Image (spheres, helix red, strand yellow):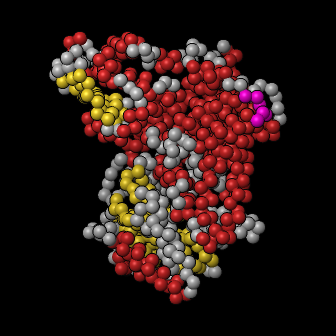
Amino acid sequence: MQVYVNTEDKAWKKYKIDFEKIANAAVLPIHKNAEVSITLIDDKQIHKLNKQYRGIDKPTNVLSFELGDDVLLGDIFISLDTVKREAKVAGISVEEHTAHMIVHGMLHLQGYDHIKDKDAKVMEDKEIKILKKLGYKDPYIDEVCACDLSCGSCKFINKLRSIKIRENSFWWYITAAILGVITSLGFAPFNLWVLSLFGIGAMYALTTKQTNHISFWKSYLFAFPFGACYGIAMFWWVLNSIYVIPELAAQFAIWTLPALIGIGLLCGAILSLPFAVVRYVSRNPAQRAILFACAWTLVLWGREWFLTGFPWNPIANITMNIPMVVNSMSLWGAMGLSFVIIGLIAAFVELVRKNQKSNWFVFGLYIVLFLIGCVAGYHNMILSDNMHKAPLIRIVQPAKSAVYKMPTSKEEAQNIAKQKIRDLFVWATEDKSESPDLIVYPETAYPYTVVDKSFPLSRVLNTNVIMGTNSYSGGNLYNSMVIADKTGVVKHLYSKSHLVPFGEYRPFGDIIPTPGQLSRGNGKELITINTNKGDFTFAPAICYEIIFTDSLIPTGTTPDAIINITNDTWFGLTPGIYQHLDMVRRYAIESGVPVVRSNYSGISAFIGADGNIISTIPAGETGSLDGFVWGAHDTPYRILGRDLWMIFILMFSIFASISISLFQKKD
């Protein structure tokens, strides 16, 4: 058989693969004089083909296109990116996995299929025989083994079981630190959620493998490197803000190392708690899994308010790219989804460790919760797709330095302010033919401090305008959102109530220097503006106010949208700007309310009530974006609230633990 190989992805050339030999090993006698084409590509190319011809919007390993001709059999496309990933997971070489893909593709071209179980068995048996002749092992043996936790032949599970790291040794602390860093990689922009599951699961396995009784503080110490390194890996980017403005960097750069150490100490103290609790309490395995999930969720709940609160990156956020799963937050919030994920991890580890009925009971319990969440998530996605007539909204993203340059005189400051106003006008109108009902500018966009009801820019733009600015009233300075109509009159002024410690106010007086000292606003409220499409009601949010559950929407109300203005210029192109966007998506899902997000130099977006990013302006790109939002609805989580759901989780944990005790007595 003649084999034509077309290498479109040059990365394939480093692998020595005899494509002709492998393809000929898989050809049937009746096709020995046929021709086949093998095209070697990457994930980007195969993603397009998969979407175009199969309607599946993701990359795959191999695609076969049968021509229905005895001579021209067809075309096989193989993606190196996917093959490499799958080979790594399976613990085999790229060459071996590629051979499997070629054989698999060849059999497809000759009429074999695996849609039905019976046909799949025939095809797989054929693949196994061909690969064996080529000197390769059965590619399906690991999959079968991994499904049977009690068989003891799964290499990966046996490897986990055989890990022996002495508690309180050097390697214990190093391993804990590495696992903390690994766990952080499940969040944006990496989105390697499998690594988060592995990191937490491996640390839980190490922690609970020890059986000797120790004090709580000692157990805390053993878990501390995990929490510290997990926190530093997640939050180091906040220190980028020190270096954005040279004048501030000169004053605050000296605080970089102390701040990094402070992040490690604080995160170690907080994020290590669940491991310290299960290590100290040392309950039976089934109950221990529930205790761990409950302790983890309590820590997340505490982070909503402890030391002004910073509930960044709940473990639920690693599922942002799994729509049905992440939308379960509409039922029980990030706390509930985190409880389920952590419970599944711990229950799985206990089940791998010992195959007993009580462990299966707990694992099954969390599987049921997971499925209930998926059903609720699917329902939320349907509700979020309920489109209706809505005003046209324009988001503006300057994506330029928030300060342009530091003025050296009053005259220069006035000239810079005038230039900013001209830029704001151009950014909102350039290359635009349609007039929007509302223009939304980001936080800190307006170069003047608002002290009265006059706002000339909205009059010039001849439409409603929302813009971030500073306002001054009663001797106090505020970080505010101004809402002005097309006549140039300020109709409403909302001021930020959840200020950033060390950035917008001094939590400890003058002990630690702080760039600003702002006053707090009055908290959550709804604002209604009149548009050509009718009244439009929204909940305002400035910057990271939107990351706090229950922080924006008054009880018993459902606005058309949340309008979030922010300025991520301070964080550059670090993970923080992508994680901030995910926190906004989290709030949209929990509340069932879409979000209009205008960012100075981060990521601006229209976000659906299901957390889906409808459209976006990429990070660092100057421009504007027109769009609509729709689908606002009540969610069980918003109706019941954060604290009541925490009570439900505690009650579930108690009753589940009692049930396990009864189950074990009966067994």
Between 410 and 540, the residue placed more toward the observer is 410
Q: Position of residue 606 (x, y in %)?
A: 40, 56
- Residue extending furthest toward the bottom: 411
Q: In percent of the image, x 83 and y 35: which residue is there?
A: 215
Using the rendered view, name the quadrant where residue 274 is placed. top right
Above/below status of 457 relative to 139: below
Residue found at x 37% / y 54%:
615
Q: How many marks?
A: 0
Residue 390 x, y percent position in the rendering: 33, 59
Q: For the C terminus, give its image quadrant.
A: top right
- Judge whether residue 653 can be spotted in this image: no
- Would residue 167 be counted in the magenta stretch? yes
Q: Is residue 358 left or right of residue 10?
A: right
Task: Check residue 160 for magenta coloring.
Answer: no
Q: Quadrant of residue 380?
A: top left
Q: Which residues are magenta?
A: 165-170
**Where residue 347 sits in the image (x, y, percent)?**
61, 27
The quarter of the rendered structure image containing the N terminus is: top left
Within the image, what quadrant is residue 112 found in? Answer: top left
Magenta region, main secondary structure: loop
- Horizontal arrangement in the rendering, residue 194 relative to residue 49 (left or right): right
Camera-side residue of 433 and 496: 433
Q: Position of residue 630 (x, y in %)?
A: 37, 54
* Residue 601, visible in the rendered structure: yes
Q: Is residue 314 left or right of residue 114?
A: right
Q: Residue at x 38, y 34 (%)?
A: 13
Q: In the rendered view, tell whether residue 462 sits above or below residue 184.
A: below
294 to 461, vertically: above or below:
above
